[in-house]
Image (tube, rainbow, N blue to C red):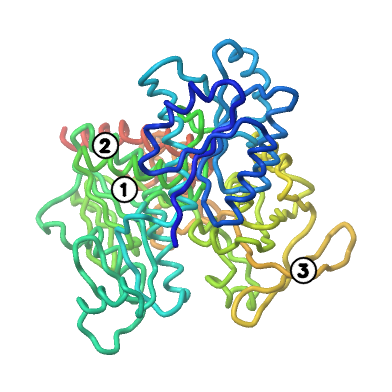
């Protein structure tokens, strides 16, 4: 039996104002009022015991005789997956904003808003909509399934598909062959003994798949679908923040733009559960939503996207010929190329754990695996912002989250707002000067062994999940030798390029490489900041250099 998700509204004096505002959600959510913290606690405890999902907690601040922050903390313990919103009457809003500053900064509250003073306060409802949208994307079971996966069990490929489809914003359901949905899909397939998993896409196609690429091709096509006699003005390799920004600005300025992405649109940033320090999003935005909005924006201007096709070679153009980006699904010819492939998480290199990838061990945030961590003890290895965001998100589901770093602490690698959020979350503990050295399990991850550098001893713990977000290695094996890179493999641009490769003793432009007409932006570029905003800025900035190069070619 499925229950309607609930919105719980706690207010001692303003229910008559708040309930009419939340009436617009009553068609899809059960809007439940309560007037005291004790009543709210008892109500929510009963709802949790009955299996009723709670999407949003709304608390009227201030609460007489009680700290609002403490009330929300207690309710978070009961239902950690619910989004939390504090509202304040206009008579108290200015003082309330100062009082709620710390709870908002530490993640105890997802949003603090002025109580609506009348009808159609759409700024208020935008905030409510964002919180409900985020809950539905990360917690709720999809009501409408764009993709349906039929399989007897969630094997490694099924988990890879779920992770990919979650990152591209496709609501997906997994069904067993003997379920009503499974039988209906398999009847359309018409095979007695199909290979698993079987995937049904929104366009009515049903087929067994062997890889994520099979699904990506059905959704986005193949690069060889581009007409052979057409030459793009810009080929962007990589659809992370830098590549997406380059695509939006290039195509909006009339340049024929093609984007190739080896995995899911959004890159590493697309796996972030919530980016809170990106300009213009005061309540934060998930990496997936930011990436999909940018993709739709670029498509609106004419960009063509192809995912699941990594570039395997770049052949520089000679004597005025276009460059050629080679993939296993066809070549893309372009007058200019923007390299925006970002970086990959470094492999841990512990064989027993590598064998459990997809079965409790995950590289990256693996958002689709978060729900499976319910009630488990989880370890996140990494000290960057992506690791911090993953820990905060996992703490909504896991019993405990341990963040393990080799440094003394997180101060030199993670943004201060995230460190505060980790410190304030009772489910999260940070362990410095430690590293994972072993682990294993029968069919999935069951235990890990840690080495503590300061105490010179090892500890073995039972855990249910390991999320690895360590280091940053460039993937540049496909680039030609004449394109200059540093000793770690990052692409050199501008004055970083060795002087013997300068043209007429002048260095290349700031984002230009040693190969004319080839540019680099984002994390793949040597010396980049490794932040979403800086990558986006570089992606936008590179377009003016592309224009300059094309203008010179025309002249």
Neighbourhood count class around disc 3 (C-alpha, 10 Å): few under 14, some 14–19, many 20 upward:
few
1 or 3: tag closer to the N-terminus: 1
Identify the image quadrant of the C terminus: top left
Query: Residue at the location (66% across, 18% down)?
Result: 98
Instruction: Say the numbered circle drawn on residue 461.
Output: 3
Query: Residue at the location (71% across, 50% down)?
Result: 427
Q: How many marks?
A: 3
Q: In this view, does 344 lie above or below 71?
A: below
Residue 3: give x, y in percent of width and height. 45, 54
Residue 252: give x, y in percent of width and height. 23, 33
Foreground of the two, 292 or 462 = 462
Find disc 2 in the rendering and name its residue. 250
Find disc 1 in the rendering and name its residue. 236
Residue at the farthest bottom position = 192
Task: State the CA–CA distance, disc 3 to disc 2.
Answer: 51 Å
Foreground of the two, 112 or 287 = 112
């Amino acid at each position: 039996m499925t229950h309607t998700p609930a919105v719980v509204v706690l207010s001692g004096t303003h229910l008559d104002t708040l309930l009419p505002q939340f009436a617009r959600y009553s068609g899809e959510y059960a809007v439940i009022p309560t007037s005291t913290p004790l009543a709210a606690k008892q109500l929510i405890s009963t709802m949790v015991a009955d299996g009723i999902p709670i999407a949003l907690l709304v608390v009227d601040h201030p609460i007489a005789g009680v700290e609002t922050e403490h009330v929300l903390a207690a309710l978070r313990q009961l239902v950690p997956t619910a989004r939390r919103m504090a509202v304040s009457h206009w008579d108290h809003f200015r003082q309330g904003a100062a009082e709620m500053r710390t709870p908002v900064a530490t993640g105890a509250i997802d949003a603090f808003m002025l109580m609506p003073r009348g009808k159609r306060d759409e700024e208020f409802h935008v905030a409510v909509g964002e919180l409900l949208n985020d809950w539905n994307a990360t917690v709720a079971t999809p009501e409408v399934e764009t993709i349906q996966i039929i399989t007897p069990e969630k094997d490694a490929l099924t988990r890879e598909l779920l992770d990919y489809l979650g990152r591209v914003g496709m609501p997906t359901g997994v069904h067993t062959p003997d379920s009503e949905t499974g039988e209906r899909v398999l009847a359309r397939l018409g095979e007695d003994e199909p290979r698993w998993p079987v995937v049904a896409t929104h366009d009515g196609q049903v087929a067994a798949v062997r890889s994520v690429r099979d699904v990506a091709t059905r959704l986005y096509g193949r690069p060889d679908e581009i007409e052979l006699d057409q030459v793009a003005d810009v080929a962007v390799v990589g659809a992370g923040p830098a590549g997406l920004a380059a695509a939006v600005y290039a195509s909006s300025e009339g340049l024929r733009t093609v984007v190739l992405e080896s995995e899911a649109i959004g890159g590493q940033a697309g796996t972030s559960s919530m980016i809170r320090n990106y300009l213009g999003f005061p309540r934060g935005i998930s990496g997936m939503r930011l990436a999909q909005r940018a993709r739709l924006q670029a498509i609106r201007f004419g960009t063509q996207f192809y995912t699941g096709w990594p570039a395997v070679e770049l052949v520089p153009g000679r004597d005025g010929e276009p460059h050629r980006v080679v993939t296993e699904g066809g070549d893309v010819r372009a007058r200019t190329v923007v390299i925006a492939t970002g970086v990959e998480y470094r492999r841990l290199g512990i064989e027993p754990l590598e064998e459990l990838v997809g079965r409790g061990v995950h590289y990256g945030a693996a958002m689709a695996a978060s729900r499976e961590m319910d009630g488990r003890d989880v370890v996140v290895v990494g000290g960057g912002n992506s690791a911090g965001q993953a820990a905060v998100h996992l703490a909504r589901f896991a019993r405990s989250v341990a963040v393990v770093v080799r440094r003394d602490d997180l101060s030199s690698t993670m943004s201060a707002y995230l460190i505060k959020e980790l410190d304030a979350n009772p489910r999260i503990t940070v362990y410095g000067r430690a590293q994972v050295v072993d682990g294993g399990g029968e069919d999935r991850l069951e235990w890990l062994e840690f080495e503590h550098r300061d105490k010179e001893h090892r500890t073995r713990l039972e855990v249910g999940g390991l999320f690895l977000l360590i280091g940053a290695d460039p993937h540049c094996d496909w680039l030609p030798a004449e394109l200059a890179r540093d000793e770690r493999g990052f692409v050199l641009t501008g004055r970083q390029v060795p002087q013997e490769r300068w043209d007429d003793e002048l260095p290349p432009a700031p984002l230009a490489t040693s190969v004319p007409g080839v540019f680099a932006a984002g994390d793949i570029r040597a010396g980049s900041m490794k932040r979403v905003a800086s990558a986006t800025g570089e992606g936008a900035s590179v377009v003016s250099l592309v224009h300059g190069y094309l203008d010179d070619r025309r002249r």
